[in-house]
Image (cartoon, helix red, strand yellow):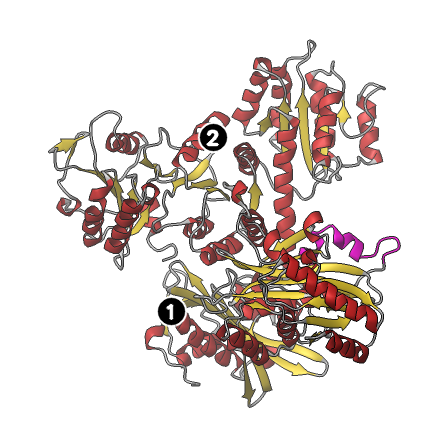
Amino acid sequence: MGIANLENMFEPKSVAVIGASDKVGSMGWAVMRNLIQGGFKGDIFPVNPRYPALWDRAAYASVADIEKDVDLAVIAVPIPAVPGIVRECAGCRIRGAVIISAGGKETGEEGRRIETEIKQEAAGSGLRIVGPNCLGIACSASKLNASFAAHLPIPGKMAFVSQSGAINAAVLDLSIREHIGFSYFISLGSMLDVDFGDMIDFLGGDPSVSSILMYIEGITRFRNFMSAARAVSRVKPIVVLKAGRSRAGARAAASHTGALTGEDAVYDAAFKRAGIVRVRTFEELFDCAELLAKQPRPKGPGLAILTNAGGPGVMAADALSDYGVEPVTLKEETLRRLSDILPAHWSHGNPVDILGDAPPELFRRVAEICLQAPEVNGLLIMYVPQALSDPRDVAEGLVDLLRSKTFPVFTSWMGGPGADKGREVFNLAGIPTFDTPERAVRAFMDLVHYAKNMEMLQQVPPKLPKKLQFDCGAAQGIIHTAIKERSFMMTEVKAKALLSAYGIPVTRTQIAVTADDAVQLAESMGLPVVMKIHAQDISHKSDVGGVRLNLMSGREIQEAFEHITESVRAAYPEARIDGVTIQPMVKRLDYELIMGCKRDRDFGPVILFGTGGVMTEVFKDRALALPPLNRLLARRLMEETKIYRVLRGYRAFPPANIPLLEETLIRLAQLVTDFAEIEELDINPMMMVEEGIVAADARILLNPSRIPAPLHLVISPYPNQYEQRVVNEQAGELFLRPIRPEDAPLLEALFDALSSQSVYFRFFTPLKRLPHHMLARFTQIDYDREIALVAIQEAEAGEKMLGVARVITLGSRKKAEFSVIVGDPWHGKGIGAALLRRCLSIAKDYGIETVHGTVLPENTQMLALGKKLGFKINPCHESGEYELTIELRAYDDPAC
């Protein structure tokens, strides 16, 4: 349901408390007290059939007895009664319910049955549910404390969402002590309905929220979560503490890939792809929250460290070193200015040690120089208690200066009760302070990583030099035949045939049933050769003596045949041996890599890349990514491994063909995108040979999937099905297709073909160029949320983008907004009409019901196009603009 009716829950005009009570300490008492004492201005209706009045208000036997409209119901009764109450709420057209009651699925089968019944009672009514088994919700703007937490949060621009009510309560308590403000505090509990994806969507669209913090134990609706996070993280930081890291990777795996893709590592890859900052501890979550709440984003990792003691400065530098970062090198001008005011024996570098007897005035003057230094992106000021200075005096001398910062400034006042006085000064002034330099540096680096991640997310991926071709029909035949024959663990020969269908190079591999066959095949292939056991039951051939390399003669081949078959029979007496395979020996090997994929039960296919060969599981040098991939994502995947440094060329190792590796990873990702039946895929080793690449061994495990491709992915892939070639009477043949991330240069060229009037009609503001972040936003779209079609004119000189049309979903995904832009040289040729018409047809397939857009009165061409396509055109009297609206349930594409 997306964010439908969530606004009614967090900014209600009226609240009914079902289970209200005057019994001190009960849930119903706590909720009533919190609503009233929190200052909620709307109507509060206590509901409890045992009381005629409660809290100086008339009490009601049921919500049906309340004569006024109710926006939010807070349910605090024993859970067996909740399904009936939810039925009443749905019947009264209440839009939101917070179920505080515990005893749901966390208690076992009976609890699961009750939750199922609750869901059935709410189905189809539009009633949104937070909980059960939750602390409740709080919103600072509406002064709503619909929870049993003791306080409303201090007003601020952060939102906190947690599955755990206990974590909610702890963070709230700490936030009050540290003077950190929050706009929302939300406990989701069992997530029967409203989940993390819904909350990210809702909070992402609220201008009062600048960042989102989450404590996650588990995720539901993974594709919706990833879609929401990828959209919102581009504009607001999302910081997550994911519990349960120790449960990773316990399941048995049939391949190296399976052994190396543990559950927690997959979460890491997913969060990274979504632009989420992941923290590891509760302390780190709160420290990161403090910096997010009180500081601007850093432009880089250039941290200056100001200290009155050498030891803490070294500790801070060491903490930076753990992240592969050094304290920023101060420029000569900065060092000169510092030397002018500091004693001769100051540290003359960064950390800036101003010595233990430094008075408050010197702290301030040094901090001022650091704040003005162009090389500095952040400033950490540390103080260790000394007999010659007072921690409060030093802090008070800095406060007004630090308020005017343009980058992160934070402090570490080390020590006990004496340092507390200084910390109190900073907390009251809204300046982050930490008790150790390590905590301070870690929080700063979390923000640096977020800023770097945002920069990476907005990079434009380069195009491949050629259009990739895939033999989907051949691959489908291989997979379907294997499943029909129940050969779920594919033999090496069949696995390589499947890879070849998707353009992944493999070594020539043939089967020999006898030793004589092996000799004959080897001689025809050319010596030397490699021999491997050919048995469907055996995954790791080298573990059972099933591989012999560099066989140079017929005699060696016959001996190897006997040795391999005897070794395998000794290790696996029950295995069915179908012979051996023969393949050419790679004569010059540069690198051995591993590429693979495993279907995660939650996130779908996960791509793996790393160091291959027999030492794969010893070194465990690997990185994970979620498909689909483009060149940029493939490069980032490789960059996360140690072997990548060598692949670029290192000492005696020649540089590898990196673009070819990118292409191969893209082909692999496309294969597992197109076929949900692939459970595990393992290419090990993938050999780099001079400028080429070849899969020397491969194993693939199939398993029929309940979810058809590409819905088994958590990230919507490029929708090839919406590509269409049309002939335009005036512009010739056009290729109408969804926009791609690689289209940024084409979109930029289209913008250059617009007149200033056309720019104003589209963007409602004069723009001389499209900023980089807008180019990224317009080309790197989520195909689940947005339809963006481009009209491409193809020629020998290259492609030219003539126009773009978009339909962007809103709120509950039933409504959407449209826009159209066509380059001025191609106005009046029907290109905009063709694009928008096709977008509307696709939007109808998406289940979108209403599409609207705002048009300036001077934009007569757009008004005429809207009328032509059947939009209702209504003037907005206040602004003078026109609102164009079309209902898609009755829409038929005139071109079809």
Residue 320 visible, this angle? yes
The extreme bottom residue here reads 729
- Does the magenta portion include 629? no
- On screen, residue 884 above or below 81: below
Q: Is residue 338 left or right of residue 132?
A: right
Where is residue 77? Give x, y as percent: 23, 38
Magenta residues, as a range? 632-653
Q: Nearer the viewer, residue 476 or 625?
A: 476
- On screen, residue 786 above or below 108: below
Q: Earlier in the sequence, mark 1 or mark 2?
A: 2
Residue 809 is marked as none
Where is residue 837? Give x, y as percent: 45, 78
Q: Residue 766 sits in which quadrant?
A: bottom right
Q: Is residue 809 left or right of residue 516?
A: left
Question: Disc 2 marks which amino acid?
Answer: Ser
- Does the magenta portion include 637? yes
- Element at label 2: helix
Specify the quadrant that holds the N terminus. bottom left
- The residue that mark 2 highlights is 175
Q: Is residue 117 left or right of residue 714?
A: left
Question: Disc 1 marks which amino acid?
Answer: Gly
Q: Categorize mark 2 by other alpha carbons within 10 Å: few (<14), some (14-19), many (20+).
A: some
Q: Residue 781 sits in which quadrant?
A: bottom right
Where is residue 350? Give x, y as percent: 78, 30
- On screen, residue 514 above or below 397: below
- The residue that mark 1 highlights is 847
Specify the quadrant that holds the C terminus. bottom left
Where is residue 459? Give x, y as percent: 66, 58
